[in-house]
Image (cartoon, rainbow, N blue to C red):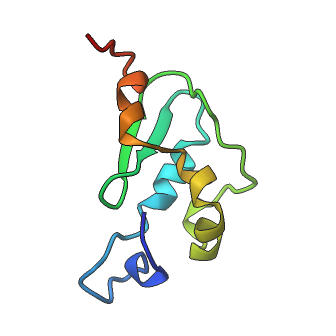
Amino acid sequence: MPRTIWNQITPRINSDWNGDVWKAIVECRTYDDIDTYTCIADRGIGIIFKRNNRKKLLIDKTNFKKLTYKEYFFNHNHFMNLINHNKINELFNVQKF
């Protein structure tokens, strides 16, 4: 989850850098057979399950490399399927004792 355009631009131009891995997360969210989330921790922790997609992203894109930071900025909550760390156990179907 890059904080600014400069944190994701490639090639890398500064030391505080996330890259554009967020684009891969967006693409994964469009697949039927994997279930993808981004935990709101640090700068985002991707969680991908091999199971049916519970919240498939419907987006009119086929070349995800061409997604822009502006699109990310205005749609990151929707694109990244953000979850709080308190919800991780529910994703794994883990019961608390």
Residue 93, horizontal then vertical, whole percent: 39, 16
Position of the N terminus, as image quadrant, is: bottom left
Instruction: Answer whether residue 43 is visible to the viewer in this image.
Output: yes
State which quadrant residue 76 falls in: bottom right
Q: Is residue 73 left or right of residue 58?
A: left
In screen coordinates, is 13 left or right of 78?
A: left
Is 92 displayed left or right of 29 in the figure? left
**Residue at 64 percent of width and 36 percent of height:** 56
The residue shown at (59%, 27%) is 54
Q: Pinpoint residue 8: horizontal percent, then vertical percent.
A: 42, 75
Taking the image as drawn, is residue 67 in sight? Answer: no
Instruction: Tell which of 89 and 96 is nearer to you.
Output: 96
Residue found at x 28% / y 80%: 16
Residue located 33% across and 16% down the image: 94
Please tell me whether residue 7 is drawn above or below residue 28 in the rendered image.
Answer: below
Residue 77, image x and y in percent? 58, 54
